């Protein structure tokens, strides 16, 4: 059973960089055919795709966040990570990591989500 | 960017009802649609992928249909555990994703 777990600070100051890591267990992140995704959800709102990374390191970003997002993967630790720079209060959200499958990037496994607040 | 317009934004229904939720894409996207269920404080759960393929372990009362622009999620025989918010998602430019605005299914 694949499991994903987000980790990182729950509070970030404005203008700083938000950093989160997703640890994958129950399966190798290097298995082909899967995307590794970051999704966020603003309080009481809908879902927003942040970006995806393939085990090879190929990255794909939401154009609205492209200039501030960096995704990376550490296959030795079976982890992938998100960095979002120059954060503002508008970046306060629950951040989820997930595994995209079936060639459709249908997210079949999700982390539990972690709330990141941006405040001084 | 491809937009997904989901309707209705909310609905009230009774246990046993047949419920239909629709999503309309801003351009043709083939069958690159997935559907998710989300309960308060929980991560979304994949129900349907490729517009009509049922995710293993999901009850057969959930079904998806459509291709091109218009897509539908149907719950045949609403159960108490189905009261939740449902989202469609398009991935035509895979892996890029956009989600519909959500439909909250409430108890009548």
Image: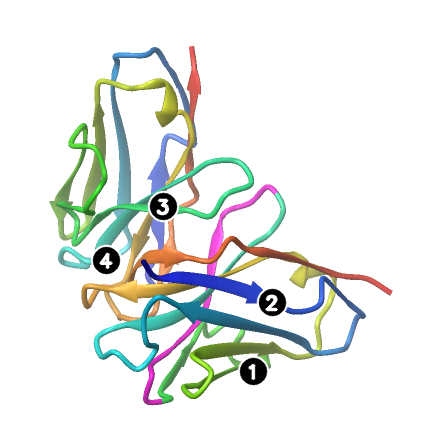
Task: Tell me if A116 is positioned left or right of B86 in this view.
Answer: right
Circle 1 crowding by C-alpha within 10 Å: few under 14, some 14–19, many from 20: few
Q: Chain of mark 4?
A: B
Label 4 with label 2: CB-CB less than 8 Å: no
* Alpha-carbon span between mark 4 and mark 2: 37 Å
Query: Can residue A105 be seen here?
Result: no
Label 3 with label 1: CB-CB less than 8 Å: no
Mark carried by residue B45: 3
Whether residue A115 appears in magenta in the rendering, the answer is no
**Residue under numbered circle 1:** A67
| Label located before the other in sequence (4 or 3) | 4
* Foreground disc of the pair 4, 2: 2
Q: Are marks 4 and 1 on the same chain?
A: no
The percent coordinates of residue B30 (x first, y second) are 13, 58
Circle 3 crowding by C-alpha within 10 Å: few under 14, some 14–19, many from 20: some
Query: Can residue A47 be seen here?
Result: yes
Instruction: Tell me which corner region of the image, top left, top right, bottom left or bottom right, holds residue A101.
Output: bottom left
Q: Is A83 placed above or below A9 here?
A: below
Instruction: Tell me which corner region of the image, top left, top right, bottom left or bottom right, holds residue A113.
Output: bottom right
* Alpha-carbon span between mark 4 and mark 3: 26 Å
Mark carried by residue B27: 4
Name the residue rendered at 13%, 45% in the picture: B52
* Alpha-carbon span between mark 4 and mark 1: 26 Å
**Residue under numbered circle 2:** A7
Task: Tell me if A87 is positioned left or right of B84 in this view.
Answer: right
* Foreground disc of the pair 3, 1: 3
Name the residue rendered at 51%, 53% in the picture: A112
Residue at disc 3, secondary structure: strand
* Alpha-carbon span between mark 3 and mark 1: 30 Å
Name the residue rendered at 20%, 47% in the picture: B55
The percent coordinates of residue A13 (x first, y second) are 81, 70
């Amino acid at each position: 059973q694949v499991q994903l777990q987000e980790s990182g600070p729950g509070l970030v100051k404005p203008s700083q960089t938000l950093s989160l890591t997703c640890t994958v267990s129950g399966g190798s992140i290097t298995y082909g055919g899967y995307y590794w995704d970051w999704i966020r959800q603003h309080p009481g709102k809908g879902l927003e795709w942040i970006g995806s990374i393939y085990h090879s390191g190929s990255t794909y970003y939401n154009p609205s966040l492209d200039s501030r997002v960096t995704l990376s993967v550490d296959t030795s630790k079976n982890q992938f990570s998100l960095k979002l720079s120059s954060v503002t209060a508008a970046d306060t959200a629950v951040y989820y990591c997930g595994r995209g499958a079936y060639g459709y990037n249908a997210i079949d496994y999700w982390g539990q989500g972690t709330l990141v607040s941006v405040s001084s | 960017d491809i937009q997904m317009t989901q309707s209705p934004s909310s609905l009230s229904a009774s246990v046993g009802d047949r419920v239909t939720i629709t999503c309309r894409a801003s351009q043709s996207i083939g069958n690159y649609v997935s559907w998710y269920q989300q309960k308060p404080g929980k991560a979304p759960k994949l129900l349907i992928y490729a517009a009509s393929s049922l995710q293993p372990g999901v009850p057969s009362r959930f079904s998806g249909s459509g291709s091109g622009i218009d897509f539908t999620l149907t719950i045949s025989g609403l159960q108490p555990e189905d009261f939740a918010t449902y989202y469609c998602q398009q991935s035509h430019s895979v892996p890029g994703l956009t989600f519909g605005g959500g439909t909250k299914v409430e108890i009548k």
